[in-house]
Image (tube, coloured by chain):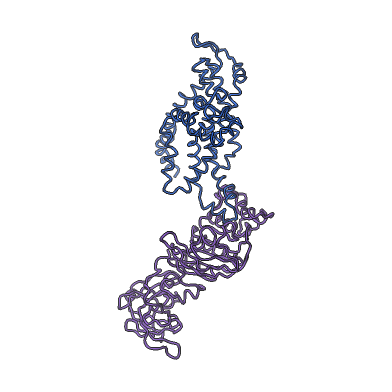
Amino acid sequence: MVETTSGDLRLVGLTKSFEAFTAVRALDLDIPQGSFFALLGPSGCGKTTTLRMIAGLEEPTAGQILIGDKDITGTKAYQRNVNTVFQSYALFPHMTVLDNVAFGLKRRGDKNATAKAKEALDLVQLGEVGRKKPAQLSGGMQQRVALARAIVNRPDVLLLDEPLGALDLKLRRQMQIELKRIQSEVGLTFVHVTHDQEEAMTMADSIAVMNGGNLEQLGDPATLYEQPRSTFVANFLGQSNLLRASVEGEPAANGIVYVTSHGHKLEVEREHLPHGIRDIWLGVRPEKLRLGPQGGPNQLQGEVSDVSFTGVATQYLVRMPWGRELVVVQQNDGSARARVGEAVTISWAAEHGFALDASQAADAGVEEES
Amino acid sequence: MADIAGVSTGEVRKPVRRGRLVPYVLLLPGMLWLVVFFVAPMVTLFSQSLQEGTVEEGYTFTGNVSIYADALQAYWPHLLRSIGYAATATVITLLLGYPLAYFIAQKAGRWKNIVLVLVIAPFFTSFLIRTLAWRTILSDTGPVTGFAQATGLTSLLQAVGLTATDTLLASKFAVIAGLTYNFLPFMILPLYASLERLDPRLVEAASDLYASPWESFRRVTWPLSLPGVVAGTLLTFIPAAGDFINSRLLGNTQTVMIGQVIDSQFLRVLDYPLAAALSFILLILIVTLVALYVRRAGTEELV
């Protein structure tokens, strides 16, 4: 009854519409077998709907879901070799922890269900609580039971629906490391849905950033962070300073393009510039900006309007002559700190800038992460 | 330090003591009600069952325990029949009520309240009127009987012994149907209450863990709705076992239930001791059966 296939998870033109509202629009994704993949986006971006379609709990309006070469689009949830760790854990309250974990194995008629369930509980370090009821456990323990209940079945794909959302910060960090450890131990394909960009970047090998039912950008965490391809990604993953600029002339031989922003001539690397675009947002991450000149041409003058000390770093707001404030984050490496009202020079290296099409809203994705 | 503590507790003590009395004060009216209208009548009834005499000449307490043996000997078929009818009606209400309660609780959406009102709507009419209406519905010349005769249902019922003739009224079938109809809301409401609390995500989780729809019902939905099933079956079975309206209005001389016997012994034959003894036997029978049932259902498992 249960199809056992293995291989990459592929979504082809996957679409889900609820009456007039389209939750997921023609999504194409290839998720390699054994990878830790994150679907990242603000609430309502379609990531959970995508997950539910993979699980078989939601029927796609169009498109296909394949594992390896097997098309599983038309199969029911209980026929798919896919398991989910639900956001609410959804542990069966009337069964013991051990029975919860053995549930899937027993449904598949596994003779060693109980023994395997015990092993899975040991894996999540809960070997002692097998005979308790879920309600007797703490949130973090319930979370690990939910994880054990899913991985014990060795599914082709393990889906995690914001599994750490209900945990407090400290426990969440602990579980992130734990999840990563378990994933590398069991070697299953993990698809992790989250709205927490830090969580996605910490854990995933690759991240698909979704917004409004569309795939914004797909890549490994470093590429997404360093080379966002839209203002949404630039703002949703960390903070970005965006300057309105226009491209001047043709690229020089060393691969540098000159742009003008508010009367300043600035440098961008050509490979960071979208092809054929003249009006751009020039973006720089706050920690790439330096207070004080660095020799290069990328320099702007402004006035410090706010200083906040965060421990490892100090965050400055620097007001530009044209009114916009830039965020600058400096490591607390012992150098002198600027004070509010001080006139400062901000500089950055050409390779740290990225350019985005200026037709996008500069504040897309801002504040949506919380 | 100790002094300060002593002083402060001394000051606090008075309001605390007053606070402790409040629950008892609140319980008092209810307790009083139970003593006057339940405990006292039970004692009177029990004592009545052990008295001898007639209504005209008055009764004297003789401790005549043999009345219980006589009552059992004369009326054990009626007792058994009552239990049998009530149990059958309870099973049917469960079979009819469960899908309906599930639908209202999980699928009805914005229709939920309307459907719930429809379930309760029969209560706006008196129990007696509703049962009398069934006489018209099942009347020998009515369309229901006509339809049943045309489809061969009456012959089938006759073959299995639920009816004695080719008609529907005045039969076992009619009595059980009446009981089922009258007590159906008592089954649906507790079932609804427990199914309404059922988290649909648990059913999704079961389905995600390879449980077919039937398996997820058997392993998740059903066990989690057991509190409603137990409450519903008790609320249906207990009053149905003592019912006398349905058997009187819809039955015949072969379908007399124990409630009907008690009713006629009290009000027509005026044999108070026998009627009291039968009441007690029924009471003990029901309490025993319910105790066994609740124990079997395992209240500990009820979340």
Residue A307 location (% of width, % of height): 37, 71
Q: Position of residue B109 (x, y in %)?
A: 44, 49
Q: Is residue B149 above or below residue A353?
A: above
Q: Residue furthest left?
A: A322
Q: Quadrant of the C terminus of chain A?
A: bottom left
Which chain is blue in the picture?
B
Residue A137 to residue A265: above or below: above
- Residue, x 41% and y 61% (percent of image)? A21
Residue A273 spot, x, y in % from top left? 43, 81
Q: Quadrant of the N terminus of chain A?
A: bottom right
Task: Give the left or right position of residue A306, taking residue B83 as reference.
Answer: left
Residue sticking out furthest to the bottom = A253
Q: Relative to A231, is B231 above or below?
A: above
Disc count in the image?
A: 0
Farthest-out residue, top: B57
Q: Is residue A253 above or below residue B2?
A: below
Please identify the quarter of the rendering in which residue A301 is found.
bottom left
The residue nearer to you, when weighing B74 against A126, is B74
Residue A178 visible? The answer is no
Q: Colour of chain A?
A: purple
Percent position (x, y) of residue B112? Answer: 43, 45
Q: Please indicate, yes or no, whether residue B190 appears anywhere in the rendered image.
A: yes
Residue drawn at x 35%, y 71% as measured from the top left: A306
Taking depth in this image into account, of A368 and B282 the one nearest to the observer is B282
Determine whether, in the image, residue A8 is placed left or right of residue A61. Answer: right
Task: Single out the residue that lies furthest toward the right.
Answer: A111
Q: Is residue B113 left or right of residue A13?
A: left
